[in-house]
Image: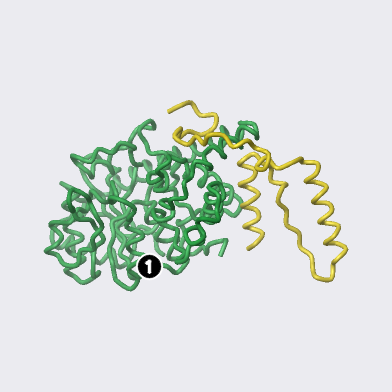
Chain colours: A green, B yellow
């Protein structure tokens, strides 16, 4: 996989329009058969794969990117379940990582997915659903409103994307870069149509890198702080905290269905649900997923009991990461270490 | 592969405050009966020293999860 090329494009104006133009082009040029997006149904945003350019006007693209769907559906799962279709998807870095993790396990064919990745400064807990959705990808939220999982995120740029869209580098313009040959071709056409222009993005690119560095550092710092804090607590207190969390589980398996990287066709936790005690249910899940957790925070969001699953999962995964220097979903060439 | 999984179990036990030494993995062949017995004995002695498993002796109190905060964290 080649990295982001040096050639950047600039888009002025509404980034949502850029996304519309880009996805429209992808459909019209036949690069993909469908775009994973959402439609509004009875006041709820549900997953829908747009197959023709006419449908695109009704599709909710930006909203889905920032807020995801109603219920347990997610972009990554949509791609995984529609194996064989050539799809394009708008993804945040964590979702892009999940796609790579699944591709390593042969659940997704990377050649059939066109990834439009966005730089993500972290999501808010109380994300305002109205107003400018795309602004959420531009403005860095403060630590106090940041989602729990996003606080400890170490990857703020999509590690693999055909087209990478970055709003974080400047308050007005959008930086667009190609990550692959495919992406470069599409951007070239888009430039021909006058949607994006070849500006002088050198400055913007440096700015973006600087911003990303700061964001990644913030995540790493939080992680370190949390870890130190956790380990400074005496063993028996840690144990009672953990058990308090684990015992609260009602085995509803929402975390399993929402997780972008839970991929087993026959999940033992679902088929043998009754045989598991609540704590064993979560422990089994943690031991199964910890090495490939991409820190998206979905499990936190969907848990009806408010268990800090991502906290436990990620800190367990971090031990694995540091021992085997394997960070989930950032390098396609490194095979997973536990299969 | 198995070793990595065992490592992960050890990590989890350590994080939970149970102690990583409660799980161990040894390599031995079918011909090493004596070695296997020794290892089993050693392990059981170690566990005797460690005392009963907290998981078994704990009192099941009301689970508390709503507080989405880590141990040692100020309330958010």
Quadrant position of the C terminus of chain B in the picture: top left
* Residue found 48% across the figure and 52% down from its top: A293
- Of B69 and A3, which appears nearest the observer? B69
* Residue found 74% across the figure and 41% down from its top: B52
- State the count of labels: 1
User: Residue A305 at what x, y percent from top left?
Assistant: 43, 41
Residue farthest bottom in this picture: A84
User: Residue A56 at what x, y percent from top left?
Assistant: 15, 60
Left or right, A195 with respect to A271, comes to left
Residue farthest front in this picture: A274
Left or right, A61 with respect to A202, comes to left
Name the subunit of mark 1.
A
Left or right, B48 with respect to A201, comes to right
- Of B46 and A8, which appears nearest the observer? B46
Residue B60 seen in the current view: yes
* Residue found 45% across the figure and 57% down from its top: A329
* A77 up-or-down from A248: above or below: below
Left or right, A303 with respect to A24, comes to right
Residue farthest right in this picture: B34
- Of A5 and A52, which appears nearest the observer? A52
* Disc 1 target residue: A110
Quadrant position of the N terminus of chain B in the picture: bottom right
């Amino acid at each position: 996989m080649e990295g982001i090329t040096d050639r950047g494009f600039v888009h002025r104006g509404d980034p949502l329009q850029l996304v519309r133009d880009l996805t429209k082009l992808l459909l019209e040029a036949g690069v993909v058969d469908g775009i994973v997006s959402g439609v509004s149904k009875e006041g709820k945003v549900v997953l829908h794969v747009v197959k023709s350019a006419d449908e695109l006007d009704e599709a909710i693209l930006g909203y889905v990117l920032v807020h995801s769907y109603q219920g347990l559906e997610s972009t990554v799962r949509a791609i995984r379940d529609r194996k064989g279709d050539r799809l394009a998807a708008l993804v945040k870095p964590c979702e892009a990582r999940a796609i790579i993790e699944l591709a390593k396990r042969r659940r997704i064919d990377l050649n059939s997915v066109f990834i439009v990745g966005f730089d993500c400064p972290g999501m808010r807990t109380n994300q305002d659903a109205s107003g400018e959705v795309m602004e959420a990808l531009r403005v860095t939220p403060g630590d106090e409103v940041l989602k729990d999982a996003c606080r400890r995120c170490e990857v703020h740029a999509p590690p693999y994307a055909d087209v990478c869209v970055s709003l974080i580098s400047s308050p007005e313009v959008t930086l667009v870069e190609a990550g692959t040959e495919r992406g470069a071709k599409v951007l070239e056409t888009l430039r021909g149509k006058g949607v994006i222009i070849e500006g002088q993005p050198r400055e913007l690119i440096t700015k973006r890198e600087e911003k990303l560095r700061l964001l990644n550092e913030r995540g790493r710092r939080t992680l370190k702080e949390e870890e130190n804090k956790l380990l400074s607590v005496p063993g028996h207190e840690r144990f009672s905290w953990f058990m308090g969390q684990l015992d609260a589980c009602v085995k509803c398996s929402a975390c399993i269905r929402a997780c972008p990287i839970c991929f087993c066709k026959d999940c033992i936790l679902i088929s043998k649900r009754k045989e598991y005690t609540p704590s064993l249910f979560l422990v089994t899940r943690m031991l199964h997923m910890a090495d490939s957790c991409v820190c998206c925070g979905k499990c936190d969001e969907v848990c009806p009991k408010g268990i800090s699953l991502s906290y436990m999962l990620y800190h367990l995964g971090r031990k694995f990461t540091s021992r085997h220097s394997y960070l989930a979903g950032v390098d396609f060439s490194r095979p997973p270490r536990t299969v | 592969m198995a070793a990595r999984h065992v490592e992960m179990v050890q990590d989890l036990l350590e994080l939970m405050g149970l102690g990583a030494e409660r799980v161990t993995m040894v390599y031995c062949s079918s011909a090493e009966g004596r070695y296997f017995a020794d290892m089993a004995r050693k392990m059981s002695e170690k566990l005797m020293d460690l005392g009963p498993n907290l998981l078994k002796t704990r009192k099941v109190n009301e689970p508390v999860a709503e507080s989405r905060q880590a141990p040692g964290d100020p309330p958010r």
